[in-house]
Image (cartoon, helix red, strand yellow):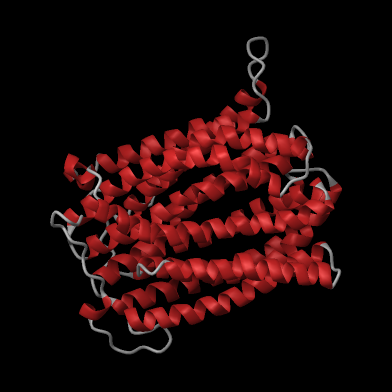
């Protein structure tokens, strides 16, 4: 059927090609979308780029509910599709859309209250803090576009459709490219624009358009046309199941973004140049990681459908194929990043101090990117198996406890300054991957008979029971 793909049969590498390539293309334009924002902010001054880095992280900490909702939809709808239970899949999809709408309202309210405290925690009083707070408040209007957009995309991915988001992000990139200067600088002789806040206003318009397109793509497919009004009636049991699957992923993502705040906490003592350099370094890092995100985004629906169908060997193969393809890519990308780091940073700024600090960060990051790939894939498999709570605990260790302790030790105790922060980040990643692999083997041992040491597990024992569909359930 149009836009739907059975991932329980056929070549797994073939499914990765079909799903990961469109996803990666969409992510390329998503990252270029953010690069455009950084570039236009740089036309103002370094303070504006520092404000963008801080304000965007603060917004994304709240919008991580969208990442969790997308994961929950991918797992619940994907497993139901794997079991050939389309009625349950439609019901969970409808509940997820309603959940996203309600969550957006709550998050906007929370952002208005908590935003100033979040931004004040990682910035010093001055122009760049004021710019960051103003940007953040405008960005809150984009919350439904992000949260519900991620949720709808999770449904589409569970159906084997990664093309829709790719197309949406391509159009959004070009829209943002035109809207940023329009809202920032206005039309000469007609309107003077709104300055730095125009970057946020452009995001609100373009991301709302992304959401509208994804809903259109979902509802015009056979799956969407089969959905009825009763699928959207809020049901406590379904909402709880979505929240249970969503919350650990969202918190894990929030912890990851909070790690950015921990780094920014150390950066602020080195001035706005260090804050801007870290923000630019993250943008470049995202560009290199795009194929990895595409691969791991494809892993979730592939693993979810096959687990729902009881095909445990295909679940294992999916993870190993993801690692093999990703590490082969990293073997080429990492040396290129090492050699071109200063040139890439020079695209966004001509401040020599920012380029110097950012290059140091990226040279350390080159050693960590293959480990990031393995970590992201491990988390995707845990989500596909509907064991997302482990991703939260791993994230808390790696991105909060370990990062804070190691960064403090290397930077303050050993007196290594900025390099101490980068080394602390590296130590957190290495130990976090070790923990992740141990946890993944333990979970896989119970659910699919293991990863590295395989033993038989019956389908009945391993596959979660389908949610209830009587009046008390979904």
Figure disc tally: 0
One can see residue 178 in this view:
no
Instruction: Please tell me which residue is depicted at 57% across the width and 75% down the height of the picture.
Output: 433
**Residue extending furthest top?**
189
Side of 16 relative to 109 (left or right): left
Quarter of the rendering occupied by the C terminus = bottom left
Q: Is residue 135 above or below residue 304?
A: above
Q: Position of residue 299 (x, y in %)?
A: 40, 65
Is 218 or 116 nearer to us in this picture? Answer: 116
Is 219 or 129 nearer to us in this picture? Answer: 129
One can see residue 146 in this view:
yes
Q: Position of residue 155 (x, y in %)?
A: 32, 51
Instruction: Please tell me which residue is depicted at 33% across the width and 79% down the height of the picture.
Output: 447
Instruction: Please tell me which residue is depicted at 20% across the width and 78% down the height of the picture.
Output: 460
Q: Position of residue 183 (x, y in %)?
A: 61, 24
Q: Is residue 203 above or below residue 386?
A: above
Side of 111 relative to 307 (left or right): right
């Amino acid at each position: 059927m149009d836009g739907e793909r059975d991932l329980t049969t056929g070549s797994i590498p073939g499914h990765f090609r079909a799903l990961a390539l469109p996803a990666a293309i969409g992510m390329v334009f998503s990252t270029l979308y953010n690069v455009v924002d950084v570039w236009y902010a740089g036309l103002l001054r370094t303070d504006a780029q520092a404000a963008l880095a801080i304000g965007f992280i603060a917004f994304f900490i709240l919008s991580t509910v969208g990442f969790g909702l997308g994961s929950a939809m991918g797992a619940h709808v994907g497993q139901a599709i794997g079991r050939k239970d389309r009625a349950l899949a439609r019901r969970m999809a409808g509940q997820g859309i309603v959940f996203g709408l309600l969550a957006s309202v709550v998050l906007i309210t929370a952002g208005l209250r908590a935003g100033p405290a979040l931004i004040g925690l990682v910035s010093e009083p001055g122009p760049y803090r004021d710019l960051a707070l103003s940007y953040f408040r405008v960005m809150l209007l984009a919350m439904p576009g992000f949260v519900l957009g991620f949720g709808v995309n999770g449904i589409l991915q569970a159906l084997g459709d990664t093309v829709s988001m790719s197309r949406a992000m391509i159009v959004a990139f070009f829209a943002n490219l035109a809207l940023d200067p329009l809202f920032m600088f206005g039309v000469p002789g007609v309107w003077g624009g709104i300055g730095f806040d125009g970057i946020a206003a452009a995001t609100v318009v373009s991301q709302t358009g992304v959401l509208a397109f994804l809903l259109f793509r979902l509802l015009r497919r056979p799956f969407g046309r089969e959905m009825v009004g009763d699928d959207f009636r809020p049901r406590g049991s379904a909402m709880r199941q979505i929240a249970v699957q969503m919350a650990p992923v969202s918190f894990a993502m929030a912890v990851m973004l909070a790690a950015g705040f921990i780094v920014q906490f150390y950066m602020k003592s080195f001035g706005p140049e260090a804050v801007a350099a870290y923000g630019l370094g993250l943008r470049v890092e995202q560009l290199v990681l795009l194929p990895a995100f595409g691969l791991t985004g494809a892993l979730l629906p592939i693993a979810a459908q096959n687990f729902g169908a009881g095909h445990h060997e295909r679940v294992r193969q999916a993870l190993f194929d993801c690692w093999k393809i990703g590490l082969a890519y990293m073997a080429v990308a990492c040396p290129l990043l090492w050699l071109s780091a200063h040139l890439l940073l020079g695209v966004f700024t001509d401040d020599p101090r920012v380029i110097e600090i950012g290059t140091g960060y990226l040279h350390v990051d080159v050693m960590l990117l293959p480990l990031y790939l393995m970590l992201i894939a491990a988390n995707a498999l845990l989500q596909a198996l509907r064991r997302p709570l482990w991703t939260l605990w791993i994230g808390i260790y790696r991105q909060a406890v370990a990062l804070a302790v190691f960064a403090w030790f290397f930077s303050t105790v050993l007196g290594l300054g900025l390099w101490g922060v980068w080394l602390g980040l590296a130590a957190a990643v290495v130990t976090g991957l070790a923990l992740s692999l141990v946890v993944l083997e333990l979970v896989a041992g119970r659910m699919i008979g293991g990863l590295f040491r395989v033993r038989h597990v019956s389908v009945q024992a391993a596959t979660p029971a389908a949610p209830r569909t009587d009046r008390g359930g979904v």
